[in-house]
């Protein structure tokens, strides 16, 4: 439930793709948004698209750094006077098979998505508990947290880790009125830097389709025959963190046009 007069959101990895769509949707709902990303220039540009610095700010924060995470949380407090809603979205995918995955690959995937979201949640929870106004933490996990696919062991393992963080934090933070929920998207090709940056080519090779047809390929294997877009994930975040689901915590919503149910 809304706590401050205007909700104050922090979205990690929000300079691109799904995170940017989430920041855009939350701003459209009237929230003030901190766009935190590795890439400062893109974070500031994404914030400027949402309006003035009274509405959205872009900050540089590598989620593998507790210091940079704290700076992003402090930026929310300084710019907007509080924090209500945190989205753990920052991520990357190396898309490698078991035998190709190096120790460094494993560590990078886990440092960004498993440890990174743990550190973001910890820094945010301190503020939420201190404020005493409740709040929301959302994890952008993945269908891969539940269902295995080839050539992505380190990525999928971090997504399963995130899914369990949702359950653990829902249990631990419930008494403070903090809801913790997750979203399991699948196959968000359009707008995704992960897909454009190599994952798309690798997945297309695995499925034996041209990369430009990957969105259509994902769509045809869903129950609804629909391509999943970043906006669809953003809509789920808005619903999950809205007043209508005030009694829901520890839940994962699939946003995959039904592929996990097929
Ligand atoms: P994207 O590349 O468009 O966005 C990811 C953002 O995270 C980028 O802006 C990047 O700079 C940022 N980032 C990467 N490492 C970071 C770090 N260490 N600290 C801070 N920011 C960092 O990709 P996307 O497809 O929008 O993915 C967003 C999230 O959604 C990821 O967690 C991804 O695993 C998850 N997801 C995506 C899909 C999909 O099909 N695209 C499916 C399921 C889950």
Image (tube, rainbow, N blue to C red):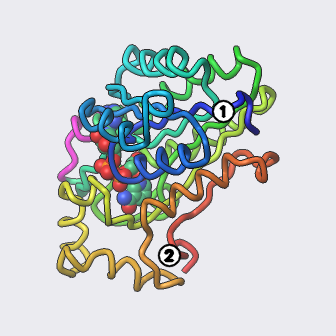
Magenta residue check for 24: no
Q: Position of residue 246 (x, y in %)?
A: 79, 46
Q: Is residue 89 visible?
A: yes
In front: 134, or 171?
134
Magenta residues (range): 100-107
Q: Residue at x 61, y 47 (%)?
A: 29
Numbered circle sitting on residue 65? none
Question: In the image, is residue 219 above or below residue 241?
Answer: below
- Figure quadrant of residue 108: top left
Is residue 150 rendered to the left or right of residue 252?
left
Question: In the image, is residue 233 above or below residue 119?
Answer: below
* Label 2–label 1 contact, CB within 8 A: no
**Residue labelled with disc 1:** 6
Badge 2 density bin: few <14, some 14–19, many ≥20, Cα 10 Å: many
Residue extending furthest toward the front: 52
Secondary structure of the residue carrying tag 2 is loop
| Ligand 1 within 8 Å of the CB at mark 1 | no
Q: Position of residue 249 (x, y in %)?
A: 73, 45
């Amino acid at each position: 439930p809304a706590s401050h007069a205007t909700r104050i959101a922090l979205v990690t990895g929000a300079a691109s793709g799904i995170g940017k769509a989430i920041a855009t949707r939350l701003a459209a709902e009237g929230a003030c948004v901190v766009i935190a990303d590795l890439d400062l220039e893109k974070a500031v540009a994404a914030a400027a698209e949402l309006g003035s610095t009274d509405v959205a700010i872009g900050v540089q924060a590598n989620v593998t750094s507790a210091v940079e995470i704290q700076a992003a949380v402090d930026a929310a407090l300084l710019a907007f006077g509080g924090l209500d809603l945190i989205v753990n979205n920052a991520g990357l995918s190396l898309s490698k098979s078991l035998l190709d995955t190096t120790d460094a690959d494993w560590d990078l995937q886990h440092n960004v998505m498993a440890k990174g979201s743990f550190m973001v949640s910890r820094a945010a929870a301190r503020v939420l508990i201190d404020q005493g106004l409740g709040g929301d933490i959302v994890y952008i996990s993945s269908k891969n947290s539940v269902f295995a696919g080839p050539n992505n062991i380190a990525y999928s393992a971090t997504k399963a880790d995130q899914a369990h963080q949702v359950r653990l934090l829902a249990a631990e933070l419930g008494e403070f009125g903090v809801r913790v929920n997750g979203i399991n998207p699948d196959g968000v090709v359009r707008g995704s830097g992960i897909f454009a940056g190599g994952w798309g080519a690798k997945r297309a090779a695995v499925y034996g389709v041209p990369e430009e047809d990957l969105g259509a390929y994902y769509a045809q294997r869903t129950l609804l025959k629909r391509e999943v877009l970043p906006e669809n994930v953003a809509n789920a975040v808005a619903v999950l963190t809205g007043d209508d689901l005030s009694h829901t915590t520890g839940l994962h919503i699939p946003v995959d046009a039904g592929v996990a149910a097929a």
